[in-house]
Amino acid sequence: MSKLNRIVIVGASLAGLRAAQTLRADGFAGEVTVVGAEPHLPYNRPPLSKGVLDGEDDIALPGAEELDSRWLRGRRAVDLRVDDRVVVLDDGSSVPYDGLVIATGARARRFEHQPPGVHSLRTVDDALALRAELTAGPRHLTVIGGGFIGSEVASTARRQGLPVTLVDAGPYPMRETMGAHAARWLARHHERHGVELVAGVRAAGFDGESRVTAVRLDDGRQISTDLVVAGTGIVPNTDWLRASGLKLDDGVVTTESLFAQGESAIVAAGDLVRWPHRHYDGALIRIEHWANANEQGALAARNLLAGPEAAAPYTAIPSFGTSVHGARVQTAGLPALGDEELILIDEPDRLAVAFLARGVLVGAVAVNAPKDLLRLKRSIAAHATRADVTAEGGATP
């Protein structure tokens, strides 16, 4: 800690805020500068596709204004000069550092041409713009992408009484995330709540110049619509690091203790981190969920103060939860790694599925079964086997 007098955090969302709070909580008395591309203080992203669209405005993350830190809001990092230990900003100014936390997150993936009426949803400004359109009373909403964001927006819009079409490239929404059985359940759940599901096709573009009038699909069909939400994933914000010499591969590649590879004064946290997870045999993974950013931001700051030799590995089991048409949908671990699904609970409104790879539990999905999900998450951490899982509650192969 004695070698660190100036710590710069690039990224002022959840991971960056947790890093700043941890630095102060762990006794760092030097200068902390937080650089944020948005003009807002840190806020909670999960409500953007749910509560904010319904009128909620209180989404601020508490604590930022209480920190003894310098906040540079509305400033974007454009370059990192590792040898000089300097972050270059979009106004031409430079911010020197002894220690650096990279937490620039990710941005929404966009279509090349998005006419008015086609929205991406990543920031609070995105959410407020979409809310204004929903309030104005569109005739029809088309959601492209049935992932968590797309499913949440579809759920919110149906609750508001709006006709919704959901377009997804897979056979069922979230097939890769939730597995075949749970994804089929989700598809039926959408349809039961009035969502028109168009699966197995991709959006190829849009008609309309002054305003979107239709979504063109890659099979030649068109969907007439006057409002679109494109929920086609996110892209890690690493463009500003291209000339830095840091290893980039679908994010910033780090050690298991979140240090940028080959660096002892640079850590990373949040949506852009790809790190070797020891629980999964060192496989490089990148997680885009709230809990991950929250926990990584704190550990990255703590490890930066401790130094690489004393740093702790990041070993948390990934988990995520959301609500879709009133159903609580949760995941734990990495279901996509599984080569076998065990159906533990299969009821109309309640579900639990375990995912195994070579007989070892690697992931789980639950619907309206939080206690079962928690039990399975603990079993994932314990490297439970197929026999362990079936012994606890039975399973349907």
Image (cartoon, rainbow, N blue to C red):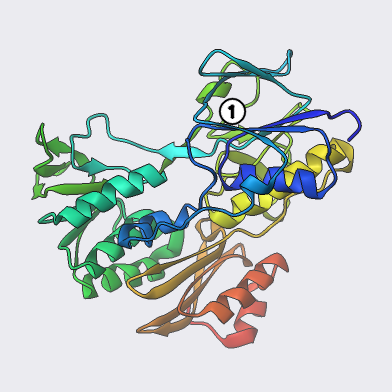
The image quarter containing residue 376 is bottom right
The image quarter containing residue 141 is bottom left
Residue indicated by mark 1: 248
Q: Is residue 147 at all visible to an observer of this figure?
A: no
Residue at 91% x, 32% y is 2
Residue at 79% x, 38% y is 304
**Does 192 sit left or right of 91 as displayed?**
left
Residue 327 % position (x, y): 39, 75
Residue at 53% x, 43% y is 41
Query: Is the residue 392 above or below the residue 22 in the image?
Result: below
**Circle 1 residues within 10 Å: few <14, some 14–19, many ≥20:** many
Q: Is residue 106 at all visible to an observer of this figure?
A: yes
**Does 388 sit left or right of 200 as displayed?**
right
The image quarter containing residue 49 is bottom left
**Does 30 sit left or right of 279 as displayed?**
right
| SS of the residue under disc 1 | loop
Q: Nearer the viewer, residue 282 or 132?
A: 132
